[in-house]
Image (cartoon, rainbow, N blue to C red):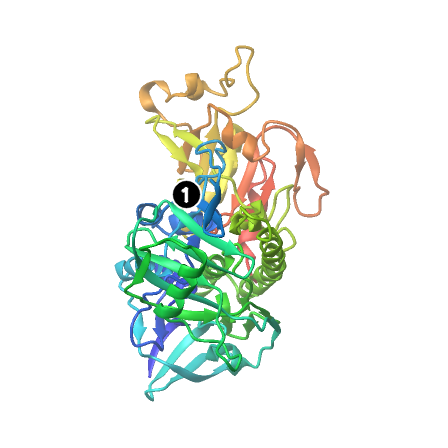
Amino acid sequence: MTATAVLIVGAGPTGLTLGCALARAGVPVRIIDKSPEFHDGSRGKGLNQRSREVLADLGMGEEFAAAGNPRLIFRKYRGGVAMADHVPEADEGADPTVPYATGLWIPQWRTEEILRARLASYGVRVELGRELTGFTQDRAGVVAELADGRRVEAAYLVGCDGARGVVRKALGVSFEGEAEPELALVGDVEVEGDLDRDCWHQWIDEDGAVLLCPLPGTRRWQLQSSPERDAEGNFLGPSLELFQRQLDRHARVPGLRLTNPGWLSTYRVNVRMADRFRVGRVFLAGDAAHIHSIAGGLGMNTGIQDGYNLGWKLALVVSGRAGEGLLDTYEEERLPVAAWTLRLTSERLRAVREGVRRAGVGTEAGFAPDLATLGVGYRWGSLAWGGPKAGERAPDAPCRDAVSGKTVRLFDVFEGPRFTLLGFGPESAEALDQVSASCGDLVRTCLIDGGGPKGEDGGPTAAGDWTAEGGPMAGGDRPAGGGGERLLDPERHAWVAYGMGEARELVGAEGEEPGRRGRGGLVLVRPDNYMAMSAAADRGADVIRRLERLGR
């Protein structure tokens, strides 16, 4: 028998994201997968904006940006004739609170490859050919049984093993929902002939469709196709020959030939969700917990965000810095998000099916701002501790280091498995000191100034000479306050994003009614970059009390 703190079953994007979050925090973790080799299929082919933020926080932002394509032209055809191009709009830098103007087109195998490399940098490698057959659990932990006769003892087990996985079935958790009868075909191919790789080509006719999407960094394309039936009415499986027939029928481009097939598969729309995401010391995440329409591409993204949510909570509990009750908030927060995702993707699929009846309309008919999942939050949850934006995603903002004058984004400050306490204005410095002294490395502190009410000259008021002209203090000295980051906000991006600079309702001390306080204040940001609470600038003791009782 071997032991670990957390055993993850399934090495797809969900399990790998969770593994990276745990390993970064120093938690012993093992990841097993029954497959004898790593998958090389495109499968999920896009990361949305929120997932890009998650992966950047885990230290992989540059790797993903280099490997993916932020923008594709959607070219739509009817009867083989190009009818319209759709160019998704993206204004880089238009919103300072959002670091990525678009998602990324990237094949799933490449996403997994980057995640595995990050995991390996922590000394953790995926164990292939390790099939889970069952497990038992008690108050002390979980004992997993593998097909080769080995046993693994773990404090916690997480099933990231997909919709057909063992973990959910062994728990006896229901997976209610419905599946459509119609199949669709998908596969990875290469294309001989003149075909623009800046476009997702969508040949959509009344009697069927073929879609070819280029996979960045490769010569391959992901092909989606309508099914075919044999003489008895049975669906034919995917093959290069079938794909070529469908392409010839709908594209009508002489000399356009499909070659070198790789991953080939079928799928049908399934909309299902587990009724629980936690049973004792065992959790479900990703497709093991919820599956839905591919419209909007949220499958892989929702799984990545499941793993990110669960990771910091397991890390704090395993390390003894939070109580077991914190783990209940995983289901509390993510189960409603999963239910919302099922509704949204079903609605987007209906929009696509209605839209493509018109010539020149393609999969962009399913687009909606919600698909970026930047608006997903947990305002209903027990970790929303007070203040007008508690439970919402913490905004990014460009600021400047108070000494060097270099640009520092708030997301850079948040990076890592700790809480961050933002103090707006010099009057918050004492509270930052108080929290830093009491909470140690559980919380980093960051004092932000230069964003208060504007002076008569239209610039930020002095609030101490350190904000002069939006640059560093004379002599390079830092103001007092917590020993953490000190940032200037000369453009007031952070102050506006966090609702500072004007009177607003803030959480009061325990036993007090919330009141309307003055300018400045405190904002506590969770390790997964959601706001836990906002409070008046002198309420450091309230932050400490909340963190001391975390999950207990």
- Name the residue at 32% across, 20% down: 475
Residue closest to the far top: 457
Is 454 rendered above or below residue 343?
Answer: above
Viewer-proximal residue among 245 and 378: 245
Where residue 155 sits in the image (x, y, percent)?
43, 74
- Name the residue at 33% across, 23% down: 476
Where residue 285 sits in the image (x, y, percent)?
49, 67
Viewer-proximal residue among 353 and 440: 353
Query: Badge 1, how many Cα within 10 Å: few under 14, some, many 20+?
Result: some
Give the residue type at disc 1: Arg
Where residue 127 sits in the image (x, y, percent)?
30, 73
Look at the numbered disc 1 and give the secondary structure of its residue: loop
Q: Quadrant of residue 151?
A: bottom left
Q: Is residue 13 left or right of residue 550?
A: left
The quarter of the rendered structure image containing the C terminus is: bottom right
Which residue carries the number 1 mark? 71
Is 12 rendered above or below residue 344?
Answer: below
**Does residue 155 appear in the picture of this structure?**
yes
